Amino acid sequence: MTQNPYNAVICIGDPRGQVTMWCPNTGAPVVKMLCHSGAVNAIAVDIPGKHLVTAGTDGKMKVWDIRTYKPIHEYWNPTPATKLAISQKGLLCVGLSNEVQVT
């Protein structure tokens, strides 16, 4: 679960590979995206709120354009990522078991 810093929408990943986006004043998700074939391990949103990064148990990590809900980039890693963070400079930090990669 993470919050989009631009518009305060809450993004939640579930075990079915789906990411749902919730607004505080709605009782149902405003967006449902099928992102992975397995569970979603981690989610991150950049500061301008234009890109969403998801990591799943399928070993894939995807960068999404939130405005169009389409993937921009897709990466595969033999070790699934468990933590994601995006810095203020736009660098992506990926936690993989006992190592960290910054791209």
Image (cartoon, rainbow, N blue to C red):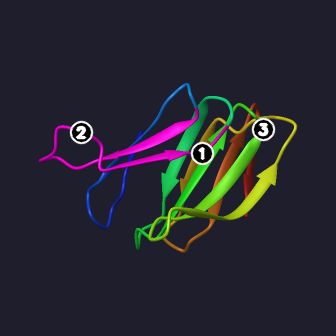
Residue under label 2:
28
Work out whether mark 1 precedes mark 3 in sequence or the reverse, and give the earlier one: 1
Residue at the farthest left position: 25
Q: Which residues are magenta?
A: 17-36
Query: What's the CA distance linking mark 3 and mark 2?
Result: 29 Å
Q: Identify the amino acid type marked 1.
A: Cys
Q: How far apart are labels 2 and 1 at the CA level? A: 19 Å
> Mark 3 is on which residue type?
Gly
Q: Position of residue 79 (x, y in %)?
A: 82, 35
- In the image, residue 94 sits, relative to residue 37, either above or below, namely below
Q: Residues within 10 Å of mark 3 (few under 14, many from 20)?
A: some
Horizontally, residue 6 falls left or right of residue 47, namely: left
Spatial CA distance of label 1 from label 3 is 12 Å
Label 2 close to label 1 by CB (< 8 Å): no
- Residue 37 image position (x, y, % from top left): 68, 34
Mark 2 residue type: Ala
Asked whether, in this view, residue 86 is left or right of residue 96, the answer is: left
